[in-house]
Amino acid sequence: MASKTSERQQNQKPVIIVGAGLAGLVAAFELSRRNVPTLILDQENGANLGGQAFWSLGGLFLVDSTEQRRLGIKDSRELAWQDWMGSARFDREDDEDYWPRKWARAFVDFATDEMENYVKARGLGFLFNVGWAERGDGTADGHGNSVPRFHLSWGTGPEVVRVFAEPVKEAATRGVVQFKFRHCVDELIVDESGRAVGVRGRVLEPDDSPRGVKSSRVAIDDFEMYGSSIVVASGGIGGNPEAVKAAWPAERLGGEAPKNFVIGVPHHVDGRMIGITEKGGARIVNRDRMWHYTEGLHNWDPIWPGHGIRILPAPSSLWLDATGKKLPGHLYPGSDTLATLKYICSTGYDYTWFILDQTIIAREFALSGSEQNPDITGKSVWQFLTTRVFGKKGTVPVQKFQKNGEDFVVRDTLEELVEGMNELARERDGPILEFDAIKKAVDIRDSQMDNPYSKDAQAMLIANARNYFPDKRGRVAPPHRLLDPAHGPLIAVRLNILTRKTLGGIETNLSSNAMRPDGSPFPGLYAAGEAAGFGGGGVHGYNSLEGTFLGGCIFSGRAAGRAIAEELLGKESKGHSDDYIDDMYSGTGLINDFLPATSY
Ligand SMILES: Cc1cc2nc3c(=O)[nH]c(=O)nc-3n(C[C@H](O)[C@H](O)[C@H](O)COP(=O)(O)OP(=O)(O)OC[C@H]3O[C@@H](n4cnc5c(N)ncnc54)[C@H](O)[C@@H]3O)c2cc1C
């Protein structure tokens, strides 16, 4: 047992947060509200503040929000919980799903009762049209969102980052928060009592690469730092295709891991810190659960290695596998990501095809990522309306992909389209498509488009989506035949598997306190965000409802910050005084790193 004096000395050290992504920033924000000294370490430079969240679309899963009610959407805690459980399908209840299930309940409550006020109080706003992601597997109690819940932040990911980064940077000007960039953590330091007390690592050489660009890993020094508590907020493994392949649940996901991926996250999402935390004595759970997308494009203008962009599809495109066969029932665009991934992997190929036309691409193609949505990121209502609602060409980034993207074929006739698809198939040693088979699939689809009713489930899905006013106005094209030249040219898109999210991770209790393999809390060690499977080591179970990742970072980062502040200060204290902060740092030589002057 540590003595009182050594406990006090320990408490006088700053809290160390590994990772300046959203989860780390939210934890720092909560700590700074009570003036708890905090040191944020990140292997990247200051231009990368906010991590993946900066690149994100900024979609948040909220339940029964003001925006939903305004649109007449009847949502509730009960419906959200039914959807969550239908998607998560927890099946390791007494073991790896013990904490994740508790986190799931707590997260649905947070998304219903608190998140809207929590983020709006920081200055975040949402677009009026709530999006409908993961529309489901066709069953009421199965996977998917029964109602639209994807609240797009006005300003996308950079705005989500800004509302937490700004107060943390302000706290840095007061000395409460210290940033240390280019500090790569390699080891946790655990004292003889079993408490996490510090980190060791390498100082990386200066690198002024712009945000998101792969940076040098050359070390120029070592470091060792001690803290009152350590928060691991280091993100997932999606930037490391080898780690993704190694963890791939082949049996559950249709056979072997795909050979080719496009990479949906920056290179720093390398997963190393999860292994380091495990080596330090924490328990990692649900490693085999992950969330990758089936609608990835090679970015024609890449920022990080293998950079892929996800299409957020709406329901009208005809979806064919690499052999030209229509995907089975209920695997429609935007409906059931993991089931589609499983089917694709079972075909033995790692790509599929969308066939669509100009009308559908203009209305239905949204690209994930802040830089792919300059209208929403730049908060331009004019650009938003003229490109998405009234435009016939799609957003400028969609037009650029259509022109420059290596996965796109744009032709006037179906014969020419199939020829172009076969050129792309050859690049991947894929099967050559037969014109007659593709024509038949297109004709069958088109036969169901002339009436507002149909016996085809995809046609019903389109009609259902258009019952939702924002989808009808701006997201789902009026039903029409693909071979109607008035809607041309025809377009085929080769869709790749895109890596993104890690659903398992460091097991934590509801205070974001990491757990040991024996089920006891690990003193001094906390984990938040993607590294912690967004809470508990796997709050999503097997499937996500979308918008739950940023929300999970906010919820688990907040839990970590609040729990640590309470451990250090008790429940009642308002926090440390400014004099305490001055005293604490005088003579330590700790100097704040350069804070990026650029916008987030
Ligand atoms: C293009 C894109 C779109 C997305 N859209 C959405 C969306 O609309 N809605 C949604 O909910 N989610 C979305 N996401 C997912 C979401 O953005 C991420 O899951 C989330 O931001 C992860 O945050 P994090 O803080 O856990 O980790 P990260 O953002 O990955 O930050 C971790 C930080 O830790 C640092 N680090 C790692 N290891 C070490 C080490 N050993 N030493 C020092 N530093 C280290 C990294 O450099 C990094 O800065 C999107 C993601 C992307 C990429």
Image (tube, rainbow, N blue to C red):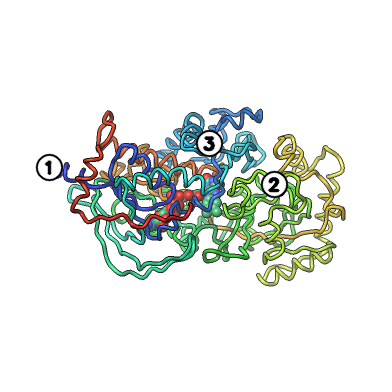
Q: Secondary structure at mark 2?
A: loop
- Other residues around mark 3 within 10 Å, as few (<14) / some (14–19) / many (≥20): many
* Occupied quadrant, residue 561: top left
- Other residues around mark 1 within 10 Å, as few (<14) / some (14–19) / many (≥20): few
Q: From the viewer's perspective, is 91 left or right of 495?
A: left
**Residue appearing at x 26%, y 62% in the figure:** 223
Q: Is residue 470 above or below residue 441?
A: above
**Image x and y of residue 373, in percent:** 62, 51
Q: Is residue 293 above or below residue 33?
A: below
Label 1, on which residue? 5
Amino acid at the residue labelled 1: Thr
- Disc 3 or disc 1, which is closer to the eye? 1
Mark positioned earlier in the residue sequence (2 or 1): 1
Residue 434 appears in the picture as rendered: yes
Label 3, on which residue? 85
Label 2, on which residue? 314
Circle count: 3
Q: Secondary structure at mark 3?
A: helix
Mark positioned earlier in the residue sequence (2 or 3): 3
**Image x and y of residue 14, in percent:** 26, 47
